[in-house]
Structure formats: C-alpha cells, structure tokens
Image: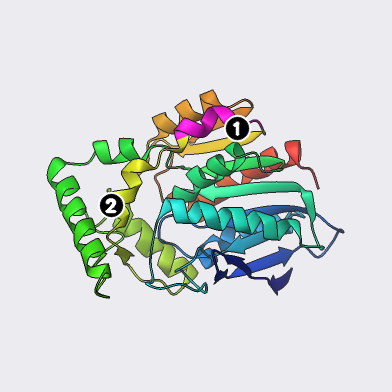
Amino acid sequence: MKSIESSFKSVGLRCAGTLLLPSRGERPPVIVMAHGFAGVRAMLMPHAQRFVEAGYAVYLFDYRNFGDSEGLPRHWVDPFRHLKDWDAAIRHAKTLQQVDGERMVLWGTSLSGGHVVCMAARGHRIAAVIAGHPLMSGLGAVAHMPFMKVLKLTLAGLRDLAGSLIGKPHYLPVVGRPGDFAVLTGPEAWGGMQELQAILDVPWENKVLARVALKIPRYNPIRKARRVRVPTLVIAGSNDSIVSAEVAQKAAGRMHDARFTLHASDHFQPYYGDYLDENVRTQLAFLHRHVAV
C-alpha cells in the first residue's frame, strides 16, 4: 500500500488528506472517507486498509478544526461546515491523477453517514454511496433525549457562543457514561470509544465545542433522501442507541436505488473485531457489484 499526503483548501483553510493506493492496478476506483462525530481520519484506517487490500484507492480527510487540518478553535463540529469540506474534498479527489475520479464512492459513518447522503443529493458525479450507522435526523435524535439533558446542552451551546465573542469557547465531553453530562451517553458510548482507542492508539481528545448542540437539531439528511439517485448502501445496527436504525431504514426507502442492511451491532462495534469484518464484507460485496476493480 502506498500512502501520499494530499491536502486541499476549504473556505480558505487547509484540510489534511491522505491518498492510499493499492499495490496493483492503474487508476482504481476511489473511496472518499471522513470520520464521524468529533473523530479524526486515522480512526478509519482499519476500514481503509481492507478496501485498499481489495484493490480500491482510498482518500481520507480531516474536517477543518480537527486532526491535522487547520482551523481555530479546535474540535468544532458543525454539520453545515462539514458539508463545505465534503464539497471541497470531492472536487480535490477528482483531480488526483492516480485514481479514476469517474468511479468515486462516498463513504461516511455516524454523522458523516448523513453527510454523504447530502452530497449525493447535491448531484455530485459519483458512482455510489456507503452510509454506515448514519445520523439521518438530528431532530429525531434530540427528541429522544431527556428534557433536562436537552436543556443543559442548549444552555451549554449558548454559553459557548457567548464565550466565543471574547475568545473563551466552552467545551463538552464527546462521550460519557450513562448519567454523565456529555454529548453521547448511550450504553455503548464510553466503553466503545475506550475499546476503539485501545485498539487504534490514535491521539484523540474527548471534547467538542458545545455550540454543536444548537446545530444538530437543524441537521436532517433524511429530507434529502429522495434526491439520491446513485446506488446506496445503508447499514444500521439493531443495538445502536446513538442513532436510529428505524430512521436510517426509512431514509433508505426514500432513495432511488438503496439497499438497507441491519447488523446486530451497537454504534461502535463496526470499527473493530468481528463486527468490523462483517461490516467490511457487506461493503465489499456492494462495491464489487457497483464499482468493480
């Protein structure tokens, strides 16, 4: 596998990107990948390596304000900013001479699972989409939270916005145990992230700007689903407490050519162990069907 650093600009800031190329074949199809909520691109390497071993090229990137990309303040999750980064990443990947930009697949997970649906709905010239455990309705996710948590998150978001005016941003933990005050506190959140960190050994801070709480309810990719015309694989987990498998299935049903697959996993299990293997097998079968090497 050959690794090439290849960054691009999004709204004037450098986004870090890495192109991974298989050892065989010329100008293979390329899978453009970005991490989920408050993650970094290195967390996707277990998936990316398997795709490259199967003969696909992979282009991984970090959003602005995350990982190796530019941008202050750090740890700024905003789905509407992310979509601009996706637009720029797709345009950049189309210029890479080592890959076949006409056979491009968009790959997203969790929050970015919704992003790739939005990108396909915008009419980018792509071959297919893979959306794993996608957040399709931010409003729905918030509606299932206890009222007091929603209130506290909203107040924290307002505090962050006010603090940003004087250079004092306010942060929240990304994951916590049930009962903690964090953005993600489902039963699998704390343990899942701990397991992932132990396996990958990737530098990561458990923090996110609190203003994200004000944006997520407004982010609802399911409303774009009917505009998705390319083959799409939507994967969800029956034990996922972070995003709704039911809403993911409903979104898939609105797409022109979508396949919905339900695995017996929670939100974090697809990133490691047996569930990772099952996840990748499903995705490779889809890729071979629509974007064969």
Expressed as whole percent of the image width and height from the top left, the position of residue 190 reads 30, 58
Expressed as whole percent of the image width and height from the top left, the position of residue 241 reads 32, 42
Residue 97 sits in quarter: bottom right
Q: Is residue 89 left or right of residue 184?
A: right
Please give the residue where the numbered disc 1 appears in the rendered image: 228
Residue 284 sits in quarter: top right
Highlighted range, magenta: 222-229
Q: Secondary structure at mark 1?
A: loop
Q: Quadrant of the N terminus?
A: bottom right
**Residue 224 colored magenta?**
yes
User: Residue at left 41%, top 38%?
Assistant: 220
Viewer-proximal residue among 49 and 147:
147
Q: Is residue 96 left or right of residue 277?
A: right
Dominant SS of magenta comes to helix
Crowd tier of the residue under label 1, counting other residues whose Cα lies within 10 Å: few below 14, some 14–19, many 20 or above: many
User: Residue at left 69%, top 66%?
Assistant: 19
Expressed as whole percent of the image width and height from the top left, the position of residue 68 reads 52, 74
Amino acid at dot 2: Ala
Residue 120 is labelled as none
User: Residue at left 40%, top 29%?
Assistant: 246
Amino acid at dot 1: Val
In this view, 115 is above or below 201: above
Q: Earlier in the sequence, mark 2 or mark 1?
A: 2
In this view, 65 is above or below 86: below
| Cα distance in 3D space between marks 2 and 1 | 27 Å
